[in-house]
Image: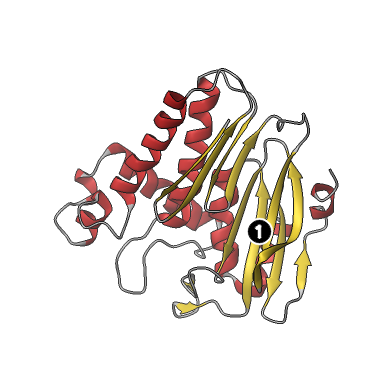
Amino acid sequence: MKQVRLMMGMPIAIEIVDPKATDGVFDEVFDYFTHIDEKFSTYKPTSEISAINNGTLALVDASEEMQLVFAMCEETKQQTNGYFDIRTPRGTYDPSGLVKGWAIWNAAKLLEKKGFENFYVDAGGDIQPHGHNADGGKWAVGIKNPFNQNENIKVVYVGNEGVATSGTYIRGKHIYNPRGGNQPVSEIVSLTVIGPNIHDADRFATAAFAMGADGIRFIEQLAGYEGYMIDNDKIATMTTGFGRYTAE
């Protein structure tokens, strides 16, 4: 059973390979994403992150969930030598580079707690699969060609690994190099990371993209992760172990 709903400005797809899946289960997961959007969207003036950014709410008075996200963002900043930074060039906070993957991961854990073993959660192309697909095989995840979004340039096959892609081909040059004068990254257009889960894959994909062409080397040195980068010259560079995910 599969459902797709447009939320958080993107399609969110959930597939559960289990006849016990009901509309109520899907509603509960989608309601969780609605909660995340209401709390963390920088586009909603009523969100908690907007209250922090406009000065009407101090971080020390924020919700436990918000403080957890800020703590995880600070940890990621330290782990990436400052390349992951939620402080925007305007001086506000935007934790979306971590929140989306974390929310997908939490949604997947919600399904696990309900006893489902075979499913995937896909929010805007960032995916957390679990178990096997309807045919009993690994989940196939397409990596979009940033120069032609109607085609996949690669397909990877995963079981429980998370797959996250950072890029400029949909939202434009919205990722900045916090260590390079907060200039938008322009030399690469797409960087996909496969990691142990979508939470970690997403946050490290964001940081690696901010590193520009050096990002793929960062992923290469990160134990348990593989990456696939495409630059402005349409040249792809992949980590040494990436190929094991391209065979079904």
Direction from residue 31 to residue 173 in the image, left or right: right
In the picture, the quarter occupied by the C terminus is top right
Residue pictured at 63% horizontal, 75% vertical: 188
Residue pictured at 79% horizontal, 54% vertical: 242
Say above or below: 231 vs 46: below
Asked whether 158 or 30 is in front, the reply is: 30
Asked whether 140 or 21 is in front, the reply is: 21
Q: Amino acid at mark 1?
A: Thr
| Residue 241 image offset from top left, x and y in percent | 82, 52
Secondary-structure class at tag 1: strand
Q: Which picture quadrant has residue 159?
A: top right
Say above or below: 18 vs 245: above
Direction from residue 140 to residue 49 in the image, left or right: left
Asked whether 210 or 118 is in front, the reply is: 118
| Residue 113 image offset from top left, x and y in percent | 51, 21
For disc 1, the neighbor class at 10 Å (few under 14, some 14 to 19, many from 20) is: many
Colour scheme in the image? secondary structure
